[in-house]
Image: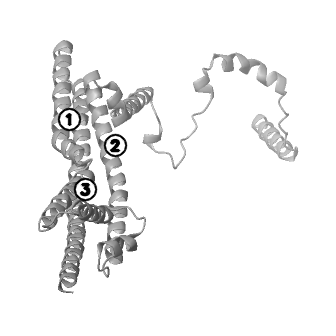
Amino acid sequence: MKTMFWSRTTLVLLLALTSAMPPVRAQPVNQSTSQTPAQPIAQQLKPQDAAPAQPAPSGATDASVATPADTGTADSGSRSAKSLTTGLHELSPWTMFWNADILVKAVMVGLALASLATWTILIAKSVEFSMLRAKLRGGLRKVSGAKSLAEAQLALGSSKNVLSSLLHAAIAELRLSQGIPNDTGIKERAASVFTEIVRAEARRVRVGMGLLATVGAISPFVGLFGTVWGIMNSFIGISKSQTTNLAVVAPGIAEALLATAVGLAAAIPAVIIYNHFSRVTKAYLELVNRASGVAGRLLSRDLDRSHVGIHSRAAE
């Protein structure tokens, strides 16, 4: 009993002492000693295990992450687009001309020169017809009130046109017919001279019209000849290369068709300009015929006056 009493008393005292003692604080661990055993473990870790994976940005999508395979596909696509663009640039008219066969080049150069001649004729004859019409209309206005050949010639002065040529021819025929007792053939001879002058004037104003007609008629066929020759060369190239790839066939056919385009570009303006000047020439020749009629009437008046003077002197 005493032993149990002392054991319980000792347990109570130990509990009282334990509750009365202050709490023990944890001592700081030395940093150098704590890192020493951890170093071998950190060195054994791999970089991907040591570094935590960074989360992808919230705005990023799967399409923005380019893999090497995607990069190669994009590069090949860009190269294909670049080669296609280069091919399109190579099919320009100027490049096709330089790459064409020598005969096709000669055809296109000839057609270009014919087209240049057409536009030159357009400018030159437009200026010529405007000046001729202005001079002839002015001369007809001046001689509209004249009563004789001499008065009409004086009204014209030193102006040179087809009307002055007709008046000079009428006066020359009167002089050449002096001394002939019968003057009934003067009008016929003067009319013959007037016809020659009108025809000469018509030939003169039609200069260049033949070239326009020729260019308009044969330019399409010349261009077609260049096209046929170029297509023949293209087929020969196909047979040699033994391929029907469009990249091989297209340039030769395009160069051949360019000759036809140049031929049409030369022929169409030539036909239009020729028809225009045909109408202008017809209108101008009508003015020339009017001038011929004016000169014939003045000659007839002079002849009638001479007959009246002869009869009046005979009556006296």
Cβ atoms under marks 3 and 2 closer than 8 Å: no
Q: Measured from the top left, where is residue 246 in percent x and y?
A: 22, 28
Q: Measured from the top left, where is residue 283 in percent x and y?
A: 22, 66
Q: Nearer the viewer, residue 54 or 240?
A: 240
Quarter of the picture holding the C terminus: bottom left
Q: Residue at x 46, y 34 (%)?
A: 66
Identify the image quadrant of residue 244. top left
Identify the image quadrant of residue 169. bottom left
**Within-10-Å neighbours for mark 2: few <14, some 14–19, many 20+:** few
Please name the residue that numbered disc 1 is placed on.
223
Q: Earlier in the sequence, mark 1 or mark 2?
A: 2
Of circles 3 and 1, which is in front? 3
Give the structural element (helix, strand or loop) at label 2.
Answer: helix
Please name the residue that numbered disc 2 is placed on.
116
What amino acid type is highlighted by mark number 2?
Leu
Direction top: furthest residue: 240
Q: Earlier in the sequence, mark 3 or mark 1?
A: 3
Identify the image quadrant of residue 153. bottom left
What amino acid type is highlighted by mark number 3?
Glu
Q: Nearer the viewer, residue 289 or 134?
A: 289
Cβ atoms under marks 1 and 2 closer than 8 Å: no
Please name the residue that numbered disc 3 is placed on.
201
